[in-house]
Image: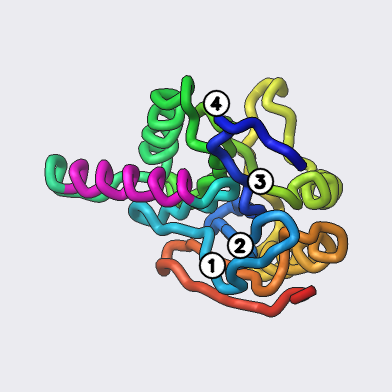
Amino acid sequence: MSRRGDWVYENNGGTCVAVAGADYCVVAADTRLSVGYSILTRDHSKICELADKCVLASSGFQGDIKALHKNLAARELLYQHQHNKRMSCPAMAQLLSNTLYYKRFFPYYAFNVLGGLDSEGKGCVFTYDAVGSYERTGYSAQGTGSSLIMPVLDNQLKSPSPLLLPARDAVTPLSELEAVDLVKDVFASATERDIYTGDKLEIVVINKAGTKREYIDLRKD
């Protein structure tokens, strides 16, 4: 595929998913980093722990993603020194939106999903476009495999419409173990059809006890 000489972006592929529950949040991403039909590495983490019980998963151009994660980590450290506490997940969600919107005329080519626990201990997921428009939902997927994964999540989780009154919590009815199993299933399915998703799956589970990671193998072809 030919590109203009002034095109500075490249999509390095990969898929990110987050599912929020009543007292937990599951954030997962594959570890494949590729360009076109070439795999650059099979062991690249797309997940960054930014704040207290708050994890960001990003897909897109890895140069921009690294710059974005570094920027957010620096801002969170500054907040920590100024306020003598760590930033909450909803506060980090707003900071990420502001940071992306500030770069709207030359955007970070990064598609983000932020997951964690809010101040009440409930799971929360925030999903973004490239210029900072965001929404709190019960689940989300970003990246090259998102069009394969989102229909399955919609079918299994059926998040309530934000237009319903009175407003309902946007958390999924699954238990933590059921949510982890569902995430494993949707990634196993996506790797069958998306060549940019595969190798390994990194799963981060956030609950009141803290954060734990788990890895499982995916297709390597």
Residue 147, percent from left and from top: 80, 44
Q: Amino acid at mark 1?
A: His
**Percent position (x, y) of residue 145?**
75, 52
3 and 1 marks in contact (CB < 8 Å): no
Name the residue rendered at 64%, 70% in the picture. Answer: 201
SS assignment at label 4: loop
Residue 57 is situated, as x and y percent measured from the top left of the image, at 53, 53
Residue situated furthest front in the rendering: 5
Q: The disc labelled 4 sits on which kind of residue?
A: Ser
Q: Residue at x 53, y 56 (%)?
A: 23
Dot 1 or dot 4, earlier in sequence: 1
The amino acid type of the residue labelled 2 equals: Leu
**Magenta-drawn segment:** 63-80
- The residue where tag 3 is placed is 142
The residue carrying mark 1 is: 44
Q: Quadrant of the N terminus?
A: top right
Q: CA distance from mark 3 to mark 1?
A: 17 Å
Which of 13 and 17 lies nearest the eye of the viewer? 13
Estimate the x, y position of residue 50 in percent, counting from the top left: 37, 53
Residue holding disc 2: 33
Q: Earlier in the sequence, mark 3 or mark 2?
A: 2
Q: Earlier in the sequence, mark 2 or mark 4?
A: 2
Tell me if residue 215 can be seen. Answer: yes
Q: What label sits on residue 133 in the rendered view? A: 4
Count of number-bearing discs: 4
Q: Pointer 2: residues within 10 angstroms few (<14), some, or many (20+)? A: many
